């Protein structure tokens, strides 16, 4: 995949830049400058919940997940890891109110960035370390029997049988809590995106699999070692301190403090000015949004129909014509046309067709009055949704100005 190749190139470029920068960046511990970072290997076992994005309710698409990773941290900020995991994914067929399961195994290669060390410097005693990562993977999916069984009643555009392999991109964030020099526990959230065919359904975009994992990590050896740079620094500072005069040190200290005060005052003034500017911009944006929402609501209409009919009556046609006139005068607004049907009459299939015909009738009327088709979005709910409590009011098309 072209996307995977580009991602690999980006990760390689980032690693080269950061690795070259690390030569000049001190990796001494913030809590004990006599020690510095030591490259180390680690393994990690994770388990938790996976969610495959789909059209069913969120809770119905949650499934178990387990991952095992092996990593190497070659810089206090940088590392790599490879892993294998997976277990189960789920998809939903809304029209059947059904959820189907299938299994997968995923192999990953990730580039790791330790945000805590990048922002706060290396600290071998830090309790919580936040990290982020990006990588690529290969997913082998299998055991899609439940989706195959539903295929007699539901059309799966990308239904696969047997097994299927997908290339994947992935990214995520996590936090590790240090328990000792060797052990840590943590939480990680990650997102994996792969071919639209992963869940057997056509969505015209990539499929997403999200994981929320808890895990335990073991480090082979400590992540710190004695610092030669610290020893050299101590000797140098001792020699220099002996030669410096107390008066010169005092003047330097006073100058440093004065510069810090000036910098702090300047930073505070800039921060205050930026906050005031942001608040003013947010206030103006909120006022504009509220005004636009009020205008849109005021010009939205209901177009009511007789039972079983999608013929536009004279009075309802006047509403549509007035809306078309307003839309032609206000080109920065669009309209969503949504058709409904009364669930107390007809069948779900007939009602869905009726709601489509009603929505299309209103859309054609608007176009005939000069409203551009690309400013009109059309949808039909049949009797799956009932916007009003009174049955007769649900024989309606809602024109929602946006």
Image (cartoon, rainbow, N blue to C red):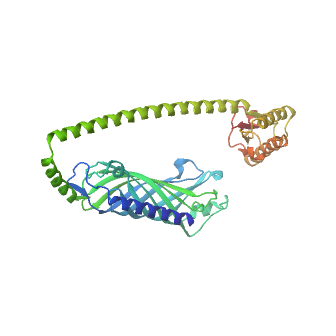
Q: Residue at x 62, y 50 (%)?
A: 97
Image coordinates of residue 190 in percent, x first then y, are: 46, 54
Nearer-the-camera pick, 178 or 343: 178
Q: Position of residue 210 (x, y in %)?
A: 49, 54
| Residue 376 at least partly seen | no
Answer with left or right where residue 96 lies relative to residue 78.
right
Query: Could you say which quadrant of the image residue 215 lies in?
Result: bottom left
**46 to the left or right of 141:** left
Residue 42 shown left or right of residue 284 in the figure: left
Q: Report the number of discs.
A: 0
Q: Position of residue 255 (x, y in %)?
A: 26, 38
Query: Residue at horizontal 56%, vertical 66%?
Result: 2
* Residue 73 location (% of width, % of height): 33, 61
Which residue is farthest bottom? 162
Quadrant including the N terminus? bottom right
Is 182 placed above or below 357 here? below
Image quadrant where one finds the C terminus: top right
Residue lying farthest left? Answer: 242
Q: In this orientation, which residue lies closer to the viewer: 359 or 115?
A: 115
Q: Is residue 114 visible?
A: yes
Give the quarter of the image for residue 41.
bottom left
Q: Nearer the viewer, residue 156 or 119?
A: 119
Q: Quadrant of residue 153?
A: bottom right
Check the image and report above or below for 68 versus 328.
below
């Amino acid at each position: 995949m072209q996307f995977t190749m580009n991602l690999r190139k980006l990760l390689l470029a980032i690693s080269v830049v950061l690795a070259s920068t690390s030569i000049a960046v001190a990796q001494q511990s913030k809590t004990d400058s006599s020690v510095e970072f030591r490259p180390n290997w680690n393994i990690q076992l994770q388990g938790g919940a996976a969610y495959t994005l789909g059209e069913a309710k969120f809770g119905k698409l949650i499934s178990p997940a387990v991952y095992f990773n092996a990593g190497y941290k070659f810089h206090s900020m940088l590392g790599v890891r490879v892993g294998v995991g997976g277990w189960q994914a789920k998809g939903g067929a809304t029209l059947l109110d059904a959820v189907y399961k299938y299994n997968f195994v995923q192999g990953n290669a990730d580039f790791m960035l330790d945000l805590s060390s990048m922002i706060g410097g290396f600290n071998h005693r830090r309790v919580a370390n936040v990290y982020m990562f990006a990588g690529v993977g290969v997913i082998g999916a299998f055991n899609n029997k439940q989706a195959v069984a539903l295929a007699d009643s539901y059309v799966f555009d990308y239904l696969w049988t047997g097994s299927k392999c997908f290339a994947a991109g992935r990214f995520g964030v996590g936090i590790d809590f240090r328990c000792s020099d060797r052990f840590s526990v943590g939480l990680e959230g990650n997102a994996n995106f792969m071919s639209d065919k992963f869940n057997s359904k056509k969505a015209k975009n990539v499929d997403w699999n999200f994981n929320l994992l808890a895990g335990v990590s073991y480090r082979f050896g400590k992540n710190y070692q004695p610092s030669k740079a610290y020893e050299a620094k101590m000797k140098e500072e001792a020699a220099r301190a002996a030669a410096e005069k107390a008066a010169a040190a005092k003047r330097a200290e006073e100058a440093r403090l004065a510069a810090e005060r000036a910098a702090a005052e300047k930073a505070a003034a800039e921060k205050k000015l930026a906050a005031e500017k942001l608040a003013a911009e947010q206030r103006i944006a909120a006022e504009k949004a509220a005004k636009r929402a009020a205008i849109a609501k005021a010009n939205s209409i209901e177009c009511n129909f007789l039972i079983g009919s999608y013929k536009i009556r004279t009075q309802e046609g006047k509403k549509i014509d007035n809306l078309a006139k307003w839309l032609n005068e206000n080109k920065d607004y669009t309209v969503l046309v949504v058709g409904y049907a009364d669930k107390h009459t007809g069948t779900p299939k007939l009602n869905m067709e009726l709601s489509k015909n009603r929505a299309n009738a209103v859309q054609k009327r608007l176009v005939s009055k000069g409203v551009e088709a690309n400013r009109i979005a059309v949808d039909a709910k049949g009797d799956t949704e009932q916007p009003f409590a009174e049955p007769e009011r649900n024989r309606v098309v809602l024109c929602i100005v946006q």
